[in-house]
Amino acid sequence: MKDTRRARVNLGLLLAAALVLVTIDHRSAAQSPFGPLRMVGTTLFGTAESVGSGIVRPVGEFFETMTEAPSARGRIEELLAENQRLKRDLVAQSLDRGRSEELRKLLGVSGAGGYKILPTQVIARRGAPGFEEAVELDVGRADGVRTEMTVLNADGLVGRVIHVGASTSTVVLLSDPASAAGARLEGSNEIGVVHGVGENGRLVRFRLLDSTAPIIPGHRIVSFGSQRGAPYVAGVPIGVVERVEATPGELTRIAYARPYADLTALDVVGVVVQAPRRDPRDAVLPSGPRKAAPPRFQREGV
């Protein structure tokens, strides 16, 4: 009992002392004798609060980031998908512009030569029975395509149709070693045969039937044409002679020409569905210096 009464007395004295101190500190304000103690307390507890906030804030941000992570990941995936779509659209627009230009030039060739053509697109490059270099077109029997039709592009002769399906057809390229086409020197009636030699279509071999006929690098070659325009119509540019082989004692002369058409990068081409009424001769050749053969009486020195 004595201990309890004494504790109550002590507690009362402490409370009374505390009230006196608070009153003195409040009334004294800036001149309070307890100012330094209050500043020390503020510093200690403020530092503790700052340290606590520094620890708690990153933890809170971490949990907030983890909470929002699925939505952020989804947004990133949406942005990546949109970026890929824009890239595809840009490529498609570029291809469309390029194909439109190719088609425009192809129609120009058709008009210059008097060919009736069916514009089409190369959809695959593949071999065919008996041939090494062939491509597949996205037109076929339903579009009026038949075998042994000439195929060209805006630059020159490409090949001939060898197989026709309902909606696709196969074309053997001029560069195929088994391919052969009648050809003529620009500005003359000197004729020969063009054969493919492979080499990815970089060159074709031109065998001139008259061994005395002059031929030099720079001479240009066009298709001679077949009967009724099948398999080759006349006047289609074939290539430019790059080198001539010496063939002493031979009945023919051999030259190698660079094809006008890039046979390794075909896209827009045309199938000639109707041959011209008359031979266009050299009218379809691109503008450039004319490489006419010299007269007969000058050939003996060649």
Image (tube, helix red, strand yellow):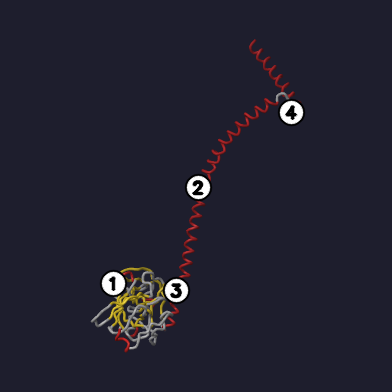
C-alpha gap between disc 1 and disc 2? 56 Å
Amino acid, disc 3:
Glu
For this orientation, the residue located farthest to the top is 2
From the top left corner, tell me how far across and down residue 101 is, in percent.
47, 73
Q: Is mark 4 on a helix, strand or loop?
A: helix
| Residue drawn at (46%, 68%) of the image | 95
Q: Is mark 1 on a helix, strand or loop?
A: strand
**Labels 1 and 2: the sequence-earlier one:** 2
Q: Is mark 3 on a helix, strand or loop?
A: helix
Residue pointed to by mark 1: 131
Residue pointed to by mark 4: 30
Residue pointed to by mark 3: 102
Evaluate whether residue 1 shows in this view: no
Residue pointed to by mark 2: 70
| Residue drawn at (62%, 29%) of the image | 45
Amino acid, disc 4:
Ala
C-alpha gap between disc 4 and disc 2? 55 Å
**Labels 3 and 4: the sequence-earlier one:** 4
Label 3 CA crowd tier, 10 Å (few <14, some 14–19, many 20+): some
**Labels 1 and 3: the sequence-earlier one:** 3
From the top left corner, tell me how far across and down residue 52 is, in percent.
58, 33
From the top left corner, tell me how far across and down residue 47 is, in percent.
61, 31
